[in-house]
Amino acid sequence: MGISLIELLGHERFLTDSHSLEHYGRDWTRFVAPAPSGVLLPNSIGEIQAIVHLARQYGAKLVPSGGRTGLSGGAMAAGGELVLSLERMRKISPVNKAGRSVTCEAGAITAQIQQAAVEEGLTYPVDFASSGSSQIGGNIATNAGGIQVIRYGMTRDWVTGLKVVTGTGELLDLNHGLIKNNTGLDFRHLFIGSEGILGVIVEATLALTHPPTNPRVMVLGVQSMPALMEVLANCQAKLSVLAFEFFSDLALEKVTAAHSILPPFQERFPYYALVEFECTSTAAETQALELVEACMAAGWVKGAVISQNESQRRSLWRLREDISETIAQWTPYKNDISTTVQQAPELLSSVDALVAQHYADLEVVWYGHIGDGNLHLNILKPDGVSVDDFQERCKAVSAHIFTAVQNLGGSISAEHGVGLLKKDFLHFSRDEAEISLMRGIKAQFDPDGIFNPGKVFDA
């Protein structure tokens, strides 16, 4: 098979050197060692189809690879697979202003798509800290969420068309970018969030919208999660909310120390809310100030700062967006969990009790998208403890955490997927009938099991 692939791609696009295997074989997960047998860099859909046919013929396995910014091991090649990188397929077609859409190849960088929309007075609103390196194919394969889900929803809500290559090498053109199309089953939605187990996304058509007007940011110091939820309810009622994020005091401490940033308050609070909202008029600004005053009078908010210009807005966002990058040096064990918005305080309280019981000697960082019920729990690895020992300790406690999630009807993975790390816990969010149907669907699209083996569930 090696000869055939070299003939197809050439030595410069079929990589086997140790650096490339290490670089392309892993995502942001650090609990699994990469071990691919090669890296493939196709230039076209036709080459991808040819690769799939060769993989079927010779029994090879393929791991689709985008920007590899995932945190569940979904893009890890740990068992001798071939990495199928989409990084050379980055074409972005001209924005369709009348239809408010853009078509792009799967390797297009998220931030470049956003910039293409901005240049035409529009926006692609799905945004997150890794947008500068993540690729749209990976975003779609994991149904990425991010910081403005409360206003704009998940990636799924913005995909109007997909081209995918299945495990048989067949090219499917799904929905053709149509807004209205009621002609039976919509396979597009099977591939969104499928984590590369059905095939590989090669092209997408995305809806665009008008950008928000004069976004402003408030950071609020609060004493408790119930108080935070009262603030959320009032913001939803009185402001045009774009984002409602939260983070713990330890998260703020880590970010400000690492980046030499002044904290927003002299006093420290258990939690902080970051609220982004549209300030469309002087009346809207007055209403925001009155809301803060009312929340302080009620005792829910103990401190507040509001951006006055774009520079201040970006600086305040850093307090939240720099958390993940900042704590990466501690090789955190991450749990990306969710429940309904109204049950988020109960979930955090339940998990906090488990954390206090099992991790009393460890640092724990909380942050998340509280406006959509998504909490990120990060257990920081202490110095002197091996990664393997740390992972085993945390994994043993995860079952208790996921039981708390299950009791509230929540999800063990709100936005990072199942991948390798959460495969053993899938039953906490999906019952056996659902998992059996998933296996059946995979068998239909990928009968030889060549795509992303061992991810989400075992075949």
Image (spheres, rainbow, N blue to C red):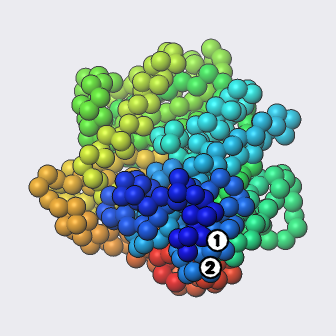
The label shown at residue 280 is none
In depth, the one of 226 and 417 nearer the eye is 417
The quarter of the picture where residue 360 lies is bottom left
Residue 349 picture location, percent across and down? 33, 57
View extreme (left): residue = 384
Q: Residue at x 14, y 59 (%)?
A: 385
Q: Secondary structure at mark 2?
A: helix
CB atoms of marks 1 and 2 within 8 Å: yes
Q: Secondary structure at mark 1?
A: helix
Q: CA distance from mark 1 to mark 2?
A: 6 Å
| Left or right of 427, for residue 112 | right
The quarter of the picture where residue 164 lies is bottom right
Residue 456 picture location, percent across and down? 50, 72
| Left or right of 199, for residue 29 | left
For the residue carrying disc 2, how many other residues have a C-alpha within 10 Å: few (<14), some (14-19), or many (20+)?
some
Q: Is residue 392 visible?
A: yes
Q: Is residue 309 above or below residue 129?
A: above
The label shown at residue 52 is 1
Q: Is residue 337 visible?
A: no
Q: Which residue is mark 2?
A: 56
In depth, the one of 9 and 57 nearer the eye is 9
Residue 60 picture location, percent across and down? 53, 76
Give the number of callouts: 2
The quarter of the image holding the N terminus is bottom right
Disc 2 marks a residue whose amino acid type is Arg
